[in-house]
Amino acid sequence: MHPSTLAKRGTILLFLVIVAFYFFGLGRLPLLGPDEPRYAQVAREMFMRHDLVTPTLGGHLWFEKPALLYWMMIASFKIFGVSEWAARLPAAISGLLTVAAVFVMGRHTGRDDEVRSLGFWSAVAAATMIGVAAFARAASFDILLTMTTAWTLAFYVLADVGQRPGDYSDPSPGLRNWFLAGFYSLIGISLLAKGLIGIVLPAGVLAFYYLGQRRLPGRKLITSLAWGVPLALLVAATWYAPVIRRHGWLFIDQFFIQHHFARYISNKYHHSQPLYYYLLVLPLLLIPWTAFFVAGLLQSKSWLVGFRASRVTQVEANVRQLMLLALAWLLFPLLFFSFSNSKLPGYILPIVPAAALIVGERLKRLSKTKGPEASTWPIAATAILSLLFAAGVIGYAFRTGALSVAAAAAIAAPLLLASAWAFAFRRRAVVLALLAFPISTVAVLVVALYCVAPAFADVDSSKRLLQLADARGYSQTPIYGMQRSDRTPEFYASGRIAYGGDGEPVMYESPGQVIDESRRRGDVLLAFVPVRELSQLTRMTSAQTEVIGNNDRYVIVAVRAR
């Protein structure tokens, strides 16, 4: 079989494996954290009302995020029914589309198979980075914005990178206009994905990109603003126009002023972190490719000074242009979010595709280098880190007992094998050594999903507790809480959660208030009570209580005032 045919079949096989991995086990875990259940519930309420304009949570207006993720969930609910799998499907699709955008950008640098391998290796890196793989398994706006940002810049690359007279990659003027139309349309979609940041990110990245080249954008790009900006606004107006018409200043104040500007300049939402926070988060999001990313950054000087050199081929100039764009894509969001007073790990997820391009360039070069002259220190460093992580997992299991030794061994085994394989082949067959890391990452994530995550997820979800309550005949009983941070009942017990006038679930601070509520209602109610406070409630003689179950954080109790 011809080597190129074999390579194409290998690429197709890899693509199918990645697709299967991203769709695998989406419904294995309950909805977790404060965001997943709320986003899924907002989408369900819009779906049940047949309303694509007004997001609500518990019947209260919910203007925290724009509508694109809700629309995708609604479509998923319509096709597959309301479930955890359907709620997470849009995120998985967004993750795969992010990988596809990275692949397209890498492939655009040239026609030669050796050059186009940049697309292959960048896609492998993007698909197996912990940041993309993890967020693509959660109902998240962050992975959605990552996807739209990646495709926005992919269309820019198609329209602009490599545009020199006589260059084989130079599209016809009409085709280039279509690429620019895609660029502006994706900006509009990004505005629907997560608000104003959808235009801030690509604008800032391109400003840094041209600043790094010490030149202005070309005339074609500048003149396209006249029709491109209205196109982006027209796309965004599919939701912003009707929601503003329906809710006016209330929407503008809550969505733009409170959840954009106040979130950025203040600690109103209690997500404060130090200035260097994302320097610590980013290496974790890039696992297992962190060492390769560092190796790529060490070569960044050549991208800044070399892409215009007269002795550089057009293909190499294209690659360096793409790397310079990736560097700008990395730096601008990192600086922008570092100066925000509200920081969460997912905020910098949109820069992970840029890191994947930088890693892909290093992997491409390593894969073409043979013999002892290959600089394989990133392979050795990653193999050592894999060994340390495997040892840490086993040590954690023995020391705490929170993880079974068998589960720890199942997680450690792929890491140990990958390390041994990488050390064995890093000088003789670099490609085989490189492939050990994505394969082991997928294996570890699959094992963790089935052997480890369910036990930990049970602590952070009310699903099992509510199922126990339903089995005892409390399926219609209203639900209250005592200082509860768990938001999962808002999805799993929708329609039964008591909300206050502020749109937040009613929380009581003492057992006496829970009993008074039962007396006021003249009926039994369910209460989520922190484990440490259970005895205060059960000892009170003014109420009859029935402890239904606990997940080591909260206990669900049926309360009836005497």
Image (tube, rainbow, N blue to C red):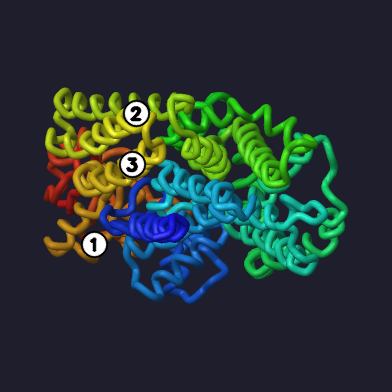
Residue 562 position within the rendered picture, expressed as x and y whole percent measured from the top left: 15, 52
Residue that carries the numbered disc 1 in the rendered image: 477
How many numbered callouts?
Answer: 3
Residue under pointer 2: 383
**Quarter of the rendering containing residue 228:** bottom right
- In the image, which is nearer the foreground, mark 1 or mark 3? 3
For the residue marked with disc 2, what is the amino acid?
A: Ala
Q: Earlier in the sequence, mark 1 or mark 2?
A: 2
* Residue holding disc 3: 441
Which of 551 and 137 lies nearest the eye of the viewer? 137
Report which quarter residue 395 is drawn in: top left
* Residue at 63% in and 67% down: 239
Q: Amino acid at mark 1?
A: Thr
- Direction from residue 546 to residue 414 in the image, left or right: right
Image coordinates of residue 178 in percent, x first then y, are: 72, 67
Residue at the limit of the structure toward the front, as seen here: 1
Q: Residues within 10 Å of mark 1 (few under 14, many from 20)?
A: some
Where does residue 427 sit, x and y in percent of width and height? 39, 29
- Residue nearest the observer in this picture, 193 or 509: 193
Residue at the spot 85% in from the left edge and 54% down from the top edge = 222
Q: CA distance from mark 1 to mark 3?
A: 44 Å
| Badge 1 element | loop
